[in-house]
Image: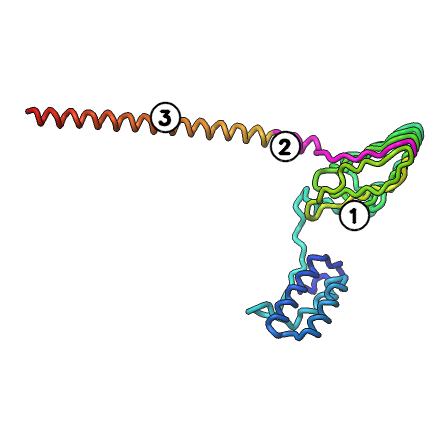
Amino acid sequence: MTDDAPDLRASDADREQVAEVLRDALAEGRLDMAEFEERLEATYQARTYGELAPITRDLPVPGGPPAVVNMSKPPAEPGSWAARIVGGEGSSTGAFAVMGGFQRKGSWTVPRRFTAFTFWGGGELDLREANFAGGEVEIRCVAIMGGMQVTVPPGVEVVVRGIGVMGGFDHREEGVPGEPGAPRVVITGFAFWGGVGVERKLTRAERERRRLERRQEKRDRKAAMRELHENFREDVQDAHRRMLDGHRDLLRDRRRDDD
């Protein structure tokens, strides 16, 4: 277990690494059941690397030296979910429209809680290119005689908990499992004579990338078919030549027999 950053917060994956070492130690008889349960409880209660480190310091990995659970975090790949959950406070905490409209789109950071309000107006919240302050963000929508549209990228889990009176919240995107590491977007609030729509949609750049991939796949299939046809034609020609050679040999043998 690294001691380089004892005050950093541990993740569920970090705690599970330590728990796995404890299970192996129990199976090998290095820990009795009471010690195992005590250390396992401490593992799942640990909040930082510094609290996790002592739990396995005196335990070896199976067949090896004392356990060293690597808590260092590799750099997040650009564009990955890990890179898009950036922490901090977010670009803004809310948006309001009275007999008008608002829009949040492009590159912005969604805070852990964002409040959107419309009265006789409309608003658009586009999260497709956004970063997120946390692994779960709440968007509180209040639409009175107005409407709002929330657009999320594929891979994000959506939970809708809003209440509508002579209005409503769109629940069609609920129930779709999120991708590993993706943020969770919880939409709450109130709609009166208005509505809040939720849509899952690719960015224009992602649509273009997928279109080019499909075009390339189509070209690759055509090239493969051409190669297949060419190989088939060559095989037929080879078979035809072998057949002619066989006929020539047969005629030559008959002539020798006649002579």
> Depth-wise, is mark 3 or mark 2 nearer the camera?
3
**Disc 1 secondary structure class:** strand
Give the amino acid type for the residue marked by disc 3 in the picture: Arg
Which residue in the structure is indicated by mark 1?
136
Which of the two discs, 3 and 1, labels the residue nearer the N terminus?
Answer: 1
> Depth-wise, is mark 3 or mark 1 nearer the camera?
3
Tell me if residue 193 is in the magenta stretch: yes
Give the amino acid type for the residue marked by disc 1 in the picture: Glu
Which residue in the structure is indicated by mark 3?
233
- Tell me the residue at 70%/48% (across/down): 181
The quadrant of the image that shows the C terminus is top left
Which of the two discs, 2 and 1, labels the residue nearer the N terminus?
Answer: 1
- Mark 3 is surrounded, within 10 Å at the Cα level, by few (under 14), some (14 to 19) or many (20 or more) other residues, namely few
The quadrant of the image that shows the N terminus is bottom right
Disc assigned to residue 209: 2
Residue span colored magenta? 192-211
Q: Quarter-wise, where is residue 121 in the image? A: top right
Q: Residue 197 location, x and y as percent?
A: 81, 33
Q: Is residue 79 above or below residue 243?
A: below
Q: Toward the viewer: 80 or 214?
A: 214
Q: CA distance from mark 3 to mark 2?
A: 36 Å
Across the whole image, how many numbered discs are drawn on residues? 3
Q: CA distance from mark 3 to mark 1?
A: 60 Å
Q: Toward the viewer: 225 or 116?
A: 225
- Mark 1 is surrounded, within 10 Å at the Cα level, by few (under 14), some (14 to 19) or many (20 or more) other residues, namely some
Q: Residue 32 location, x and y as percent?
A: 66, 75
Residue 117 visible (yes or no): no
Which of the two discs, 3 and 2, labels the residue nearer the N terminus?
Answer: 2
**Disc 3 secondary structure class:** helix
Q: CA distance from mark 2 to mark 1?
A: 28 Å
